[in-house]
Image: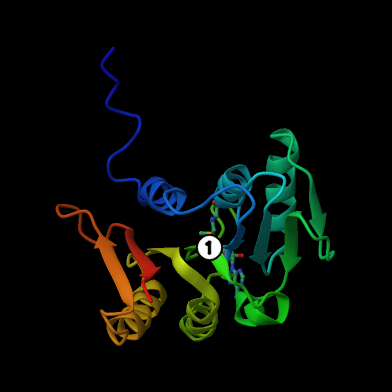
Amino acid sequence: MRKTLQEPSLIRMVRWAQRLVAEVLEVGDLAVDLTAGNGADTLFLARQVGPEGRVLAFDVQLEALRHTGMRLTEAGISWTFDDQDDAGVRLIQDSHARLTSYTQGPVQGIMANLGYLPGGDQGVATRAETTLSALRQALDILAMGGRMSLVGYVGHAQGKDECRVVEELLQGLSSRHWHILRMQVVNRFEAPYLLVVERRG
Ligand SMILES: C[S@@+](CC[C@H](N)C(=O)[O-])C[C@H]1O[C@@H](n2cnc3c(N)ncnc32)[C@H](O)[C@@H]1O
């Protein structure tokens, strides 16, 4: 039967981010969610890597990690909070700018949905400086053939600035070693857009 127009939406970038990261993730892999938020990407990553794999999920807000934990529990996935278990999902209340204090990789899949927690405090949004620091570290520990997705929001000044510096960083990467894709809505001004980075060699 033909699907209704509401779902799945062609222009939902978080959905494309998951599909493109799923292509390179296997059971047993290590994955990182740089912005856990309400946990949709953390749950997706946990399902992809399975109980033998490992997911590190960062957020500076306890509220976000609570939501993420609840979502995982509802899905029957166990998790730990700031604990150093070998396998499973580890929720970390810290800035993603400290990524390599928690793992040296190699990480097969990394996701970042920038901006603020939907329904939460809009003042606690990702920021250009910390995002750049996290992305530099993420590029260092991304596995060969691994992918990192970034959903950027250009609908407000801070987000615009953040996306600008992120793109400057990515444009400086050698096309021999990095494949980088941008996916965007053509006919909606300032819609969220997607960047996907793949390490080639
Ligand atoms: C758009 S939300 C993420 C949405 C999430 N991926 C989901 O599926 O619901 C962005 C999140 O980034 C978090 N955040 C902001 N600055 C951060 C930082 N420096 N380190 C880690 N997380 C941060 C916010 O607290 C917020 O929860």
Camera-nearest residue between 104 and 118 = 104
Q: Is residue 178 above or below residue 80?
A: below
Instruction: Confirm or reject: label 1 Cβ below 8 Å from ligand 1.
Output: no
Look at label 1 and name its amino acid: Gln
- The residue where tag 1 is placed is 108
Residue drawn at x 51%, y 72% is 142
**Residue 78, located in which quarter of the rendered image?**
top right
- Count numbered badges in the picture: 1
- Residue 171: x and y, percent? 27, 82
How did the renderer colour the structure? rainbow
Camera-nearest residue between 52 and 113 = 52
Residue drawn at x 27%, y 65% is 181
| Quarter of the image with the N terminus in it | top left
Q: Secondary structure at mark 1?
A: strand
167 vs 59, left or right, is left
- Residue 69: x and y, percent? 74, 48
**Residue 85, located in which quarter of the rendered image?**
bottom right
Q: How many C-alpha atoms fall within 10 Å of the one at disc 1: few (<14), some, or many (≥20)?
A: many
**Ligand 1 is located in which of the four quadrants?**
bottom right
Q: Is residue 189 above or below residue 178?
A: above
Residue drawn at x 68%, y 75% is 103
194 vs 89, left or right, is left
Residue drawn at x 37%, y 79% is 166
Q: Is residue 42 above or below residue 132?
A: above
- Residue 87: x and y, percent? 76, 55
186 vs 72, left or right, is left
- Residue 21: x and y, percent? 44, 54
